[in-house]
Amino acid sequence: MRRAELVGGLALALAIGCNQPHPLVICHNANCGEPTDPARDDTLPAFRESLALEEDGRPVIDGIELDSFWRGSDNVCLYAHDVSNFAENTPAIAPAQELALHFAKPGPITFGDTPFLVLLELKASVSANAKERHTPEQRALHAKCAWDIYKIVSDAAIATGRDVVVEFQSFGPELLRAVIDNAPASTPTPYKFGAIQGVASPLDDQTRSLRDYTGLPISDIQVHPGWLLDAKHEAILSSGAELSFFWFSTTTEIFAAIRKYNPAAVDTSEARLMRRWLER
């Protein structure tokens, strides 16, 4: 290839890269305060701090992840990442109620004036034992709890004129089916469904094959970029769903994966770092 052609090709590649839209920055486990402290995941103080983060007078984040955990021992729907802390008793609707107050405040609620994305993850286990899963009745009850959260968020969005999208997501496709089966008659705020893909089997048995989500209207597949193999990426592309990322600690490999795959959204606890990197 001649030098002029090579230079022209590189310029075109750079132009395409620059014109690619930035991924949405979502606050992982509603815990994006600094310094990063995983012990504060899914706690109301961290939730409030995360919503208040700003960069150049704009909100740092474009959305936030809320977790709902169905505790099987007493059939209670909690705002929790797990129940390793047996004193955890925050109701699952609590962050939604605070989000409603946030919507009512003046000013923007996302960095780029995009719709605010609420990732609502339904946790797939019902106890500290990750292998203990929902009974059919518990799945239905957990789904109804998720719709209670949706209603609070939706009512607040409509009352305040905010553009909001809710994404129900889970490692358990059966839970997403239960959400569909228990949908209320009125759903005025847009919602969608997402599958989560983490550490691959046999290292971890939480991640299910994408085949298990067959028949569900999955529009987002959230993947840990450290475990994104070429075959998985090809399967996501062929499914027609968007690719998004989640991770725990940002590394150079994470930055490289974002450049390579250009995910629609990134779910990170280091939201300010990610925002500054994207806007550099």
Image: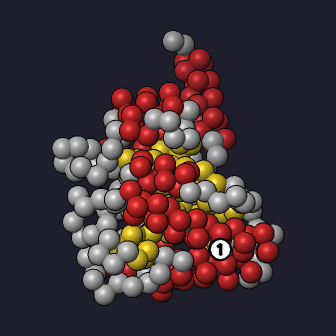
- Expressed as whole percent of the image width and height from the top left, the position of residue 99 reads 62, 77
Residue at image location 65% in from the left, 69% down from the top: 151
Residue at image location 58% in from the left, 70% down from the top: 149
Question: Going by the picture, which residue comes out furthest to the front?
Answer: 137
Residue at image location 64% in from the left, 54% down from the top: 191
Is 6 left, or right, of 211 in this rendering? right
The amino acid type found where label 1 is placed reads Ile
Q: How many marks can you see? A: 1
Picture colour scheme: secondary structure
Residue at image location 64% in from the left, 46% down from the top: 21
Q: Quadrant of residue 63?
A: bottom right
Residue that numbered label 1 is attached to: 152
Question: Going by the picture, which residue comes out furthest to the top?
Answer: 1
- Expressed as whole percent of the image width and height from the top left, the position of residue 42 reads 43, 76
Q: Dot 1 lies on which element?
A: helix
Residue 221 visible in the current orientation: yes
Figure quadrant of the C terminus? bottom right
CA neighbours of label 1 inside 10 A, class few (<14), some (14 to 19), many (20+): some
Q: Quadrant of residue 166?
A: bottom right
Give whichever of 142, 42 is nearer the camera: 142
Give whichever of 269, 145 is nearer the camera: 145
Residue 37 visible in the current orientation: no
- Expressed as whole percent of the image width and height from the top left, the position of residue 248 reads 35, 62
Question: Going by the picture, which residue comes out furthest to the left?
Answer: 202
Give whichever of 21, 229 is nearer the camera: 229
- Expressed as whole percent of the image width and height from the top left, the position of residue 203 reads 19, 48
Is 12 left, or right, of 70 in this rendering? right
Is 116 left, or right, of 248 in this rendering? right
Q: Quadrant of residue 125?
A: bottom left
